[in-house]
Amino acid sequence: MKVLIIGGGGREHAMAWKAAQSPLVSQVYAAPGSDGIASIAECVPIDVSDFEALSHFAIEKSIDLTLVGPELPLVGGVVDHFKQKGLKVFGPSKAAAQIEGSKAFAKALMEKYAIPTSEYQAFTDYEAARGYLHQVGAPIVLKADGLAAGKGVIVALTMDEAEVGLKTLMKDKKFAEAGARVVIEEYLEGEEFSLMALVNGEQVTPLAIAQDHKRAYEDDKGPNTGGMGAYSPVPQIAPAVVDEAVRTIVQPAASGMVHDGCPFTGVLYAGLMLTKNGPKVIEFNCRFGDPETQVVLPRLKSDLIQVIDDVLAGRKPTLEWTDQTAVGVVLASAGYPGAYAKGGTIGDLAVLPDEALLFHAGTRKTDAGWVTNGGRVLLVTRLADNLRTARDAVNQDMAQIATDAVFFRRDIGHHALEAAEK
């Protein structure tokens, strides 16, 4: 098979890396890919939003299967375009991708099918939203309704933070049209985890869970980011809780979308909170999570391409996992998730040992070496028999390549280690 990966970030690097391991696959392409992905796939300079050029390339190269990484082309309808051309693609239609493209759509779906989530209201009028804020009080969560690269969420612990956050979204238009409608949600407390499932209509195949670390700085301080690191498995989340989440959240969402005439095919990501009343939905995404993919796929012993082929054919796939723990840590540009410079120096990546899995996210290769080319620069994953050993190893790796131009969190996985000590 020839496989095309649409995208060029760390998640897509992990997808390409896993696809290249498949005995079914003869060639992996990535569009646009990156200098980092070029080590395992042939990169083609086509933008993820240029559907016509992407499909033309897929036809020209006789691509057998296309996997879509980022949310932007999915919400824009790349899957519909590929299917109209008779191409095999794994991802949701434009209608189904609304589950990520519109927070209000997702909330309405959950309300209709009694899927446990936080109380909420959606607003397009600033004064009405502000009035509701003062009615419910803080802590509270504000979300831009549309796509905001994982950064359109404001967790306001005080009313002052809530007022500033609402103004940032609706008046200052920090996320442009994504914030034209704002969802104001109840603040949920508990243990957070990410559950991704391979879905085809009502068929749901859950993957191993992971826990992402959204805050920029250690001890979960600082602004929300696209994710500073992740680990899998998550020992403080019992298997029975995961089973409950599949039964009460993922399966009803998949079945509900079939019932509503927008069946979902692809990776359905559920960001969940284990509250005192059981698991509840924080958010749905319509694709593999980033950075969760970079720790979940390294634990998957099964052939990802065979698994996806089975899902698309309506067959029940076989999933086999390693018992080892994967810890992935993001190296980010200084200033991220705010303003940051590009072109910063990174330490010599050649010093990383073979056991360190390196996934490039925002790097560029120059004659002088690798430099930064994005907010999240790269991610290193280590597998080990326990979480502490894996984290110690990856922190040592990161310390070798960190410079003044970048930073990383050293406490990835601290929730699990703290839970184990109680």
Image: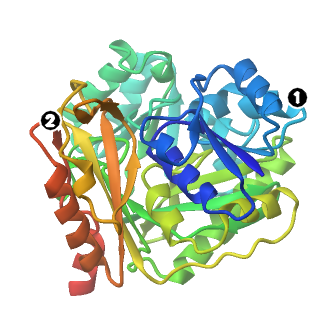
In the picture, measured across the screen, residue 211 lies left or right of residue 58, that is left
Q: Secondary structure at mark 2?
A: loop
- Residue type marked 1: Lys
Q: CA distance from mark 1 to mark 2?
A: 44 Å
Q: Residue at x 50, y 72 (%)?
A: 299
- Residue type marked 2: Ala
> What colour scheme was applied to this rendering of the protein?
rainbow
Q: In front here: 223 or 244?
A: 223
Query: Is the Cβ of the residue at disc 1 closer than 8 Å to that at disc 2?
Result: no
Which label was assigned to residue 85? 1
Q: In front here: 260 or 54?
A: 54
Residue 305 seen in this snapshot: yes
**Occupied quadrant, residue 309:** bottom right
Q: Is residue 408 above or below residue 252?
A: above
In the picture, measured across the screen, residue 152 lies left or right of residue 194, that is left
> Residue 161: x, y in percent?
22, 34
> Residue 170: x, y in percent?
39, 18
Q: Is residue 309 above or below residue 144?
A: below
**Occupied quadrant, residue 334:** top left
> Residue 125: x, y in percent?
47, 17
Residue 252 seen in this snapshot: no
Of marks 1 and 2, which one's residue comes earlier in the chain?
1
Which label was assigned to residue 405? 2
* Structural crowding at the residue carrying mark 2, measured as other residues with C-alpha within 10 Å and reported as few (<14), some (14–19) or many (≥20): many
Q: In front here: 235 or 288?
A: 288
Q: Residue at x 22, y 26 (%)?
A: 340
